[in-house]
Amino acid sequence: MHPLFSYFSSSNFNYTFLEKEKKIIGRTDKVDFPVLELKDIDAKIDTGAYTSSIHCIDIREVDQTLQCSFLDATHPEYNGKKFTFKNYDITAVKSSNGKVETRFAIRTQITLFNKTYPITLTLSPRDDMRFPVLIGRKFLSGKFLVDPQLENQSYNL
């Protein structure tokens, strides 16, 4: 066996050198979206999903703008406030059931570990899902390592 492989496979190896570059996040967390005025929103960290998504309702295009509302009775911050976006995209997303859906996508900001990052979110009615926000690989890549045994690492700071 090559010495490098034996070093990495040994029980002496630890991930401290990776922690300096990437934060360790758990399978769930609470996130803030400052531009959307949403705080402490439950999020599922999903390395199986490429894109990130947020629950919203009444999604529609009106006069070259995108309008939607964030409303969910189980999350008080989702208070039904209507938002209008002038800058948005339309994208194809393959859902967990394998179907390809066309969704609207917005660019906004997310706060994790007391740091604010840009993020692209697809808009989707997720009322049948446990978490109103799903954070996918596109956002996580290069910034975070996911440990599925952990929860609320950013929120617990």
Image (cartoon, grey):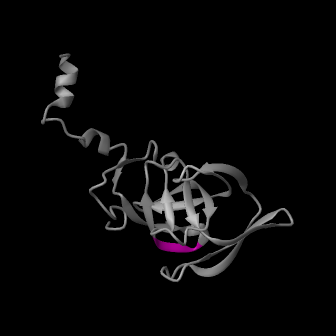
Q: Which quarter of the image is occupied by the C terminus?
A: bottom left
Give the number of callouts. 0
Q: What stretch is highlighted in magenta?
A: 37-41
Is 97 on the left or on the right of 62, as rendered? left
Is 70 on the left or on the right of 24, as rendered? right
Is 120 on the left or on the right of 46, as rendered? right
Q: Which quarter of the image is occupied by the N terminus?
A: top left
Residue closer to the observer: 58 or 14: 58
Q: Could you tell me which residue is drawn at 74 percent across and 58 percent down?
A: 87
- Which percent across, then down, holds residue 52? 54, 55
- Which percent across, then down, holds residue 65? 80, 64
Check the image and report above or below for 146 versus 80. Answer: above
Identify the image quadrant of residue 63. bottom right
Q: Could you tell me which residue is drawn at 18 percent across and 30 percent down?
A: 9
Q: Is residue 98 magenta?
A: no
Q: Could you tell me which residue is drawn at 62 percent across and 58 percent down?
A: 122
- Which percent across, then down, holds residue 46? 43, 53
Which secondary structure dominates the residues rendered in magenta? strand
Q: Which residue lies furthest to the top in this view?
A: 2
Identify the image quadrant of residue 105. bottom right
Check the image and report above or below for 65 versus 39. Answer: above
Q: Could you tell me which residue is drawn at 20 percent across and 39 percent down?
A: 14
- Which percent across, then down, holds residue 146? 35, 50
Identify the image quadrant of residue 69. bottom right
Q: Residue furthest left?
A: 11
